[in-house]
Image: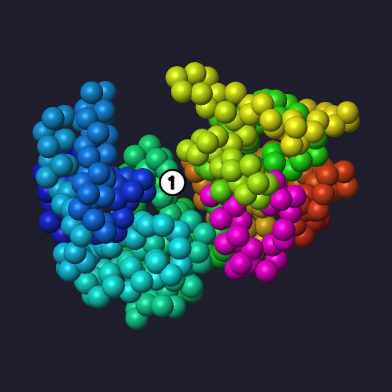
Amino acid sequence: MTIENKLKKRNNVSVGVIGSGLMGHGIAYAAALSGFEVLMLDLTKKKAKEGLEKIYQILEKILEKGFITKAEMDDTKSQIKISTDYETLASKNIIIEAIYEDLKIKTKVLKIAERFLKPNGFIASNTSTIPISVLASKLRNNKNFIGLHFFSPVHKMKLVEVIKGKETSYNTLKTALNFTQNINKTPIIVNDNPGFYTTRVFVKYPCEGMVMLSEGIKATSIENAGKRAGYPVGPLALSDEVNIDLIGRIRKQILKYDKSSYVGPWDRVIEKMVLKFNRKGRSGYGGFYQYPKGKKKYIWEKLEKYFPISVNQIPEKDIIDRLIFAQVIEAVYCYEKNIITSARDANIGSMLGLGFPKSSGGVLEYVNNYGIQKFNVRCLELADNYGKQFIPPKLLGQMAKANTTFN
């Protein structure tokens, strides 16, 4: 994009980002790089400056790689201002909240920010679990409110989950979609529900890995099967990267707002790892893996002590199927419940945002290729052998009878 085009775009729309942490500065970077004038706000000048420095570091890296010119980098830097004063959000067309996943704090921040939004603008939350309609109920004009769930790291991840609340207007949805496309992201449209679409489907992969660990399946077998299935990393390594305690908080949010969810063996593994052993993941003191400084990670040596290996190991095919089917079944449930209404969006979301094996074509295309009837039968086999999380959605039986596919 030429600087002239960027200038034209930013003269029309300005963006406020509340929060300068990992997600906040990532969103501010993406908007500024695409030509938008951006204000990044945080509680202290120190935090805001740290976020700005992170943006500069990203820009330097992509300059070194030849993705932008020096002029484009300088132009992008000039688009970003930082502040600690909410009044500097005045006249912003778009305000995006990207702070800690806490309902009370988010509500407080959104109510203040709403006062400064332009009448024809929209305000968004980057929440990954709290229902948009719950947040919207605290605002004066919930028609202008929407969810924009970015993925970390924002400067690398293309997907944005655009979440419609019960009262979100068509104009707000349309404007939000245009914005995400203008910052070179790929949006998928999702209806409001606890955990939305991607978070609900995402957690099934690491959680099923934890279930198998609790059953006495070797950690190495679980990890190798995940990679053999086509995932970038194994489910236990992914748990560490995301942080086990964060997965626990996500689970609590889903359980709080979705009464059809239930406490499973994965929740007990999370509780044991976080509360009993203080093993929260890579950013803590380690999780399922140990992370020696300057050396290759390795599976925590005490894991076998606390999760003894069973003499009865299951076939690798079953491990692979359990990991894949856990996510696919949840995706089908989301489609059945109209959380996501487009098979295309469901597939794109799973590949761009969840690391689902790309060779499959996505979660729902996986079912198409497997065969609806065959997939339904395999679900029942897995449910009989490994638990109710594999009970197939009713929709699959209906589709098998009608001989239809996801399209």
**Position of the N terminus by quadrant:** top left
Image position, residue 18 (x, y; %): 29, 59
Mark 1, Cα crowd under 10 Å, few <14 / some 14-19 / many 20+, is many
For the record, the magenta segment spans: 246-269
Residue visible at 26% across and 50% down?
Answer: 47
Image position, residue 11 (x, y; %): 12, 56
Residue type at mark 1: give it.
Phe
Please, is residue 147 above or below residue 182 in the view? Answer: below
Which one is nearer the viewer's eye here, 11 or 318? Answer: 318
Identify the image's colour scheme: rainbow, by chain, secondary structure or one colour: rainbow
Query: Is any atom of residue 7 visible in this view?
Result: yes
User: As drawn, which residue projects farthest toward the top?
Assistant: 295
Please, is residue 41 above or below residue 117 in the view? Answer: above
Residue visible at 72% across and 61% down?
Answer: 262
Which quadrant of the figure has residue 281? top right
Query: Is any atom of residue 314 visible in this view?
Result: no
Number of numbered discs present? Answer: 1
Image position, residue 249 (x, y; %): 56, 55
Residue 256 magenta: yes
- Magenta region's main secondary structure? helix
Which one is nearer the viewer's eye here, 270 or 121? Answer: 270
Residue 276 magenta: no
Image position, residue 320 (x, y; %): 73, 33
Residue tagged by mark 1?
151
